[in-house]
Structures are given as C-alpha cells and as structure tokens.
C-alpha cells in the first residue's frame, strides 16, 4: 500500500505549533508507540509533518530510535498499554529528562551512550513498532528530500 505525504492532521490531532521543530517531531513520533494500529492517514500526516519540519528519513529515524523510543518503547511491553496517546507537554518533559540523563558527563552518561547499550535499546524499544516506523520512512522517502 502506497502512503502519500499529507500536511493535514487526522481530525482533532496535533495542534503543536508552539513547540520547537525537534519537540514537534517527538510528539508526532511518540504516537507510533500507542497500542493501536497506526492508520494510513496518521502515517501520511507524520511523514508530511516531519518533512515540513525539514527532517529527512535518516534524521527522523535517529530521533525516533535514539530520543523517542527509549522513553515510549516501554508501552509496547506493558500489560495495559497506553492506546489513547500522551499529553504533548508530558512527551516533551519525558524526552527532555531522558536526554539530560543520557547526555550527562561521567560514567553514568557514558554507559547510556555506549554503543552496545545503544544498539540493544534501539532493538528492544523499537521492535514492537518498527513496522509503523517503516511505513513513515517509506512515505518520507517517496516524498523526496525536504
């Protein structure tokens, strides 16, 4: 199924213009971790919004796997997962907090950044939603570079 890029959000979703472009990317990508199937219109909007923000597929994938997945990937393992989504402010706060822990100086920060640990985190936190991410990446690639 070919999914085109759209600038139109699904009804009632994502009024996020008050956030920075990076934070907007976090908010739309966090939606991929809900415990529901991501619809073609949501995939189209996510890809369109990322493209409009100036993110190519490679950059968006780094944001998805290195910044959003470590915070929201747990939802794919929960017995009672979140399926409605998260509050935009809490998404920004949680990811900002994660990045502060990951990027801190010293041994603890180095352990967060270690290559083997980073590869494991990427696999562990994205394996339940990699199919949704791939649909977004394919739509971004099909739309061309921003």
Image (tube, helix red, strand yellow):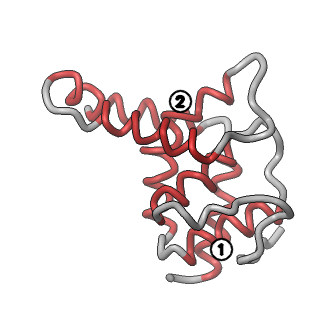
Up-down relation of residue 113 to residue 49 (above or below)? above
Tell me if 94 is positioned left or right of 15 in this view: left
Image position, residue 128 (x, y; %): 67, 35
Q: Is residue 136 above or below residue 131?
A: below
Q: Which mark is residue 124?
A: 2
Task: Give how far apart the Cα atoms at labels 2 and 1 are.
Answer: 27 Å
Secondary element type, mark 1: helix
Give the number of the mark in front: 2 or 1: 1
Query: Does residue 145 appear left or right of residue 129 in this picture?
Result: left
Whether residue 70 is situated above or below residue 12 in the rendered picture: above
Are the residues flagged by discs 2 and 1 in contact, CB closer than 8 Å? Answer: no
Q: Which residue does the image show at 67% across and 64% down from the upper left?
A: 46
- Extreme front residue here? 18
Q: Position of residue 125 (x, y in %)?
A: 55, 33
The N terminus is located in which quarter? bottom right
Splitting the image into 4 quarters, where does residue 110 fall?
A: top left
Residue 68: percent from left, percent from top: 51, 44
Local secondary structure at mark 2: helix
Pick whichever, 73 or 20, lies toward us. 20
Q: Residue at x 66, y 42 (%)?
A: 87
* Relative side of 50 to 2, left or right: left
Give the labeled residue for mark 1: 48
């Amino acid at each position: 199924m070919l999914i085109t890029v759209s600038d139109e959000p699904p009804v009632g979703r994502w009024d996020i213009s008050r956030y920075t472009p990076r934070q907007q990317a976090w908010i739309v990508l966090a939606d991929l971790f809900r415990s529901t199937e991501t619809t073609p219109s949501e995939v189209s909007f996510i890809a369109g919004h990322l493209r409009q923000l100036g993110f190519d597929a490679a950059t968006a994938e780094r944001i998805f796997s290195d910044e959003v997945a470590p915070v929201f990937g747990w939802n794919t393992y929960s017995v009672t997962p979140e399926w409605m989504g998260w509050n935009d402010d809490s998404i920004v706060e949680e990811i900002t907090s994660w990045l502060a822990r990951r990027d801190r100086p010293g041994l603890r920060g180095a352990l967060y950044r270690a290559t083997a640990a980073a590869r494991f985190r990427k696999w562990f936190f994205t394996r339940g939603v990699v199919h949704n991410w791939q649909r977004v990446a394919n739509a971004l690639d099909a739309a061309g570079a921003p």
